[in-house]
Amino acid sequence: MQQYDYSSFHYCEAPSIVSGSIPGENSRVLLDKQEQYESNNRSYPRSMPVAFRSSMGSVIEDVDGNRFLDFFSGCGVVNLGHNNPVIMEGMQQQMDKVIHALDFPTEIKIAFMENLNAMLPDSLRDKVKFNFCGPTGADAVEAAIKIAKINTKRDSIFSFQGAFHGMTAAALSVTSNDYNRKQLKAHGGQVSFFPYSYCYRCPFGKKADSCKLECARFLRNALENPGSGVDTPCAIIIEPIQGEGGTIIPREGYLEEVVKIGNDHHIPVIFDEIQVGFYRSGKLFSFEHTNAVPDLVTVSKGIGGIGMPLALLLIRKELDIWTKATHTGTFRGNQLSIAAGNAALRFVQETNVLEHANAVGEYMLDALREIQKRSKYIGEVRGRGLVFGLEYVKDINTKEPFTEFVGKLRNNCLQKGLLFETGGHYDNVIRFLPPLVTTKNMVDRFLDIFERANYALEQEIQ
Ligand SMILES: Cc1ncc(COP(=O)(O)O)c(C=O)c1O
């Protein structure tokens, strides 16, 4: 096993802001040109106005030479670090062979499936088929819903409050966010949203010592009470840790109960591992921290190692009843992406990256909890592996969401060279998703700047 300390995987001097403020002059020029040519659909450059030119490890550099500590990772995508040389080498080797091969078998594709199958938990190894999807997470969600409908011949679906599953028609329909849903009412069948196990804001008013998993009971009741007003669905789709919803880690026993409810009613359960899968939580899949076993699993983002587009649906063999060409797509199984995915799997198998990431994750969680003690507005710190959420509230007792603080803090941190994501049911959660190769030293630098910015903003608004 290759033992790295990972310090050589990154640009060394970061963060470093040399342009005075962000955006710098060169970024401004490109942002203006972007506005001229690119649709209003542009999203991230509005909240983080920068134009990038190069990247290495956990550092990304803009066109003015500013270097940012990237704890955003392209929204949980570059799990093994920007331009990880081992993954690049795997892609380079494939470049000389074949790049586009539709869904024909190739040596690299077979190697990838064999490796992935070998790395699956016992509950899924040799028990699932892999479906290559159009290379975005949303298409994996579309495929999952489609095959669930084919299996059950039902039309309606259950999802959860705070869920994000993507922006294509069916995926959007199971996404709960108000703004997103209002853009398009897409899905034909009934979609019912149930409370997630969000203990910090339990809708049943329970505390840890009084909780009897009322959220799961509520779900069961919807199926067992003939007067509930909801149809038995084709599937229950759930994120084992809610990502965009604010890094919400459900209570112990909850996912198992959701699966049991699905099994009791012959409803396939889809675990959406697109954001928290591929070792972000410390294990290949975040559901592996529980005893829950899904029927269908969606995978994308991190599986491409360094941001190569790849999306998969894992299907229990007995559900794989669709016939040929039921979910086609020209770019399913891009060979360069598969080569990157295969190199990523081997990187995890052959190096100490997991041990490293888990140690850094624990270190960072402890440090964030210390920061919480010194902060006025951090209501809760959540984390597992290398995915974190800091929920901001105006008052620790009333828990009134402090959304404006989060937006300002993100911008102030951008000016200091820190990149991270925000989210949450109320858009009041700061989310860190650093690459797994991030070092403790980088975490120290990041958190030092973050805490100063947090403190300064607290002082400013008093
Ligand atoms: C849990 C989850 N599912 C699905 C998606 C959609 O993936 P994509 O944006 O690649 O379509 C996302 C994206 O953030 C996600 O976090």
Image (cartoon, rainbow, N blue to C red):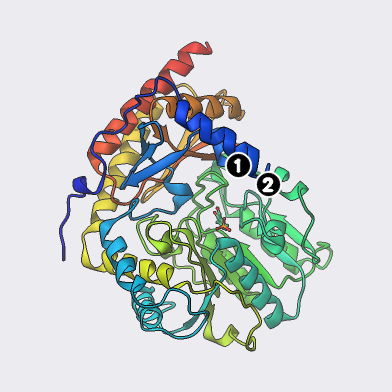
Q: Identify the mark at residue 43; answer none if there is no mark.
A: 1
Counting from the top left corner in percent of width and height, residue 72 is at: 44, 43
Q: Between 287 and 79, which is closer to the camera in this rendering?
A: 79
The three-letter code of the residue at mark 2 reads Asn
Q: Which residue is mark 2?
A: 177
Q: Nearer the viewer, mark 2 or mark 1?
A: 1
SS at mark 1 in the image: loop
Relative to 238, residue 449 above or below: above
Which quarter of the figure is the N terminus placed in? Answer: bottom left
Q: Looking at the image, which residue is at 60% across and 30% down?
A: 401
Q: Are marks 2 and 1 in contact (CB under 8 Å)?
A: no
Distance from the alpha carbon under mark 2 to that under mark 1: 16 Å
The three-letter code of the residue at mark 1 reads Ser
Relative to 88, residue 461 above or below: above
Does residue 266 appear in this view?
Answer: no
Counting from the top left corner in percent of width and height, residue 164 is at: 61, 53
User: Which badge, 2 or 1, comes first in the chain's sequence?
Assistant: 1
- Crowd band around label 1 with a 10 angstrom C-alpha radius: few (<14), some (14–19), many (20+): few
SS at mark 2 in the image: loop
Indicate left or right for 442 with 392 as reference: left
Relative to 198, residue 15 above or below: above
Counting from the top left corner in percent of width and height, residue 299 is at: 49, 66
Q: Looking at the image, which residue is at 26% across and 57% down?
A: 85
Q: Between 30 and 156, which is closer to the camera in this rendering?
A: 30
Indicate left or right for 462 with 363 as reference: right
Counting from the top left corner in percent of width and height, residue 192 is at: 74, 59
Q: Looking at the image, which residue is at 52% across and 79% down?
A: 102
Quadrant holding ligand 1? bottom right
Specify whether tag 1 is near ligand 1 (CB below 8 Å): no
Q: Looking at the image, which residue is at 33% across and 74% down?
A: 96
